[in-house]
Image: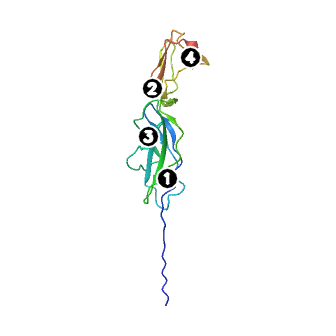
Amino acid sequence: MHLLIFSYIIIVVRPDAPEPPKADRITKDSVTLSWRSPRSDGGSKIRGYIIQKKAKGDDDWSDVNGAPIPSNVYTVPNLKEGEEYLFRVFAVNDVGSSDPSRPSNPIVIEEQPNKPVMDLGGVRDITVRAGEDFSIHVPYIGFPKPTATWFANDVIKDETDPRVHQQLADDFARCVFFLLKKQELK
């Protein structure tokens, strides 16, 4: 009778460094960073990530988050407007922390333009009778406040026509047409 005994040795090491973080969104006092996971987790599941920052002219890096975060996206708050920062990320598994990622490109903290996105869900075909007023209301998100140009039958409708009133707010654009004539309704 033969007795076979198998033994396995699993070697677990620190993970590789993640990819350098990239800025997804920058505001006047924060930056949202994202990064790719390391190529190797070291044989143990990645528990989270530690982010560090360094302001231009500083010698030392400082931790942004006290405990590892499980996500590959993080918004760093409380940054100084106009200041330039570098960021780097460490991956953490059961064995320990990776080497740091390469630093991000320099990131200047300032409000960044945000391309306008219109919500056209409420815009419908409108039936209007001659002599009636009507308005079109279009919500949007964007920074800085965009301009709005309204067209009817390929003709720009603006304030030069006393029967047209335009309103542009921080979150919507509206155009009101007053007492339309029958030939304008075609």
Comes first in the chain, label 1 or label 4: 1
Query: Could you tell me the amino acid type at mark 4?
Result: Leu
Residue annotated with mark 3: 75
Residue 5: percent from the left, percent from the top?
48, 81
Residue 80: percent from the left, percent from the top?
42, 32
Q: Residue at x 43, y 39 (%)?
A: 76
State the count of labels: 4
Comes first in the chain, label 2 or label 4: 2
Question: On screen, 179 above or below 16?
Answer: above
Question: On screen, 87 above or below 127?
Answer: below
In the image, which is nearer the foreground, mark 2 or mark 1?
A: 1
Mark 1 vs mark 4, CA separation in Å: 68 Å
Residue annotated with mark 4: 185
State the image quarter where residue 28 is shown. Answer: top left
Residue annotated with mark 1: 99
In the rendered image, the residue lying farthest to the right is: 154
Label 3, secondary structure: give it: strand
In the image, which is nearer the foreground, mark 1 or mark 3?
A: 1
> Is residue 186 rendered to the left or right of residue 84?
right
Residue annotated with mark 2: 171
Dot 4 surroundings within 10 Å: few (below 14), some, or many (20 or more)?
few
Q: Residue at x 45, y 24 (%)?
A: 170
